[in-house]
Image (cartoon, coloured by chain):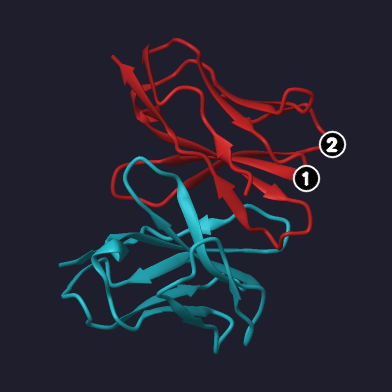
Amino acid sequence: NAGVTQTPKFRVLKTGQSMTLLCAQDMNHEYMYWYRQDPGMGLRLIHYSVGEGTTAKGEVPDGYNVSRLKKQNFLLGLESAAPSQTSVYFCASSYGGSPLHFGNGTRLTVT
Amino acid sequence: GESVGLHLPTLSVQEGDNSIINCAYSNSASDYFIWYKQESGKGPQFIIDIRSNMDKRQGQRVTVLLNKTVKHLSLQIAATQPGDSAVYFCAEKERGSYGKLTFGQGTILTVHP
């Protein structure tokens, strides 16, 4: 039972490049989330999904897109990376009323 | 929007002492609160949670207290150990918000042997 797995662990992008972060969970959770964590700040919600085929905006959605084609996977895309998107990205999953289970993060640097 | 915040950014204690980490919240519509521990290079790890219909909940060496009157949440760690050194986050969920959490800034707990 791996829990929540994020790939890649590290990535460096140049401004304007695109990339996709992959999140996979093996707990059959309905809900999945993408958060970003910046120094000195708590986690902020980017997008979330309440089930396969559904997505919704969180607190800081601009510059990101997501897809939930399969229940176990939640993809976060950056179409045109900007330095302001340098951050650590965390994926999480949960049942509706249960604690979120987090992955170990993807550290992204945009130069 | 409303947010959750922490009173103290850092806390240093001696091994064996009890630790108390505090958190203030402002959203009166929150019905669920949770504490996470985050170690360097890792994702947040669930510690304990509490629903708004409770005032206190105990786990193994940890206790969460909720005071809805003053919108205050605290995490008590008994007999703190060096392995407890980490950043601790409180988070709250608004009623009906599909499990979405709003996080505080975090408190750095350092336990000295």
Q: CA distance from mark 2 to mark 1?
A: 12 Å
Q: Secondary structure at mark 1?
A: loop
Q: Are marks 2 and 1 in contact (CB under 8 Å)?
A: no
* Chain painted in cyan in the figure: A
- Where is B21 relative to A108, above or below? above
Dot 1 alpha-carbon crowd within 10 angstroms: few under 14, some 14 to 19, many 20 or more: few
* Chain painted in red in the figure: B
Residue on which disc 2 sits: B53
Camera-side mark, 2 or 1: 1
- Where is B88 relative to A55, above or below? above
For the residue marked with disc 1, what is the amino acid? Ala
Q: Secondary structure at mark 2?
A: loop
Residue A94 place in picture, x, y as percent: 62, 62
Asked whether, in this view, residue A20 is left or right of residue A60, the answer is: left
Front position in the image: A81 or A51:
A81
Q: Residue at x 55, y 89 (%)?
A: A69
Residue B94 place in picture, x, y as percent: 72, 50
For residue B29, the mark is 1
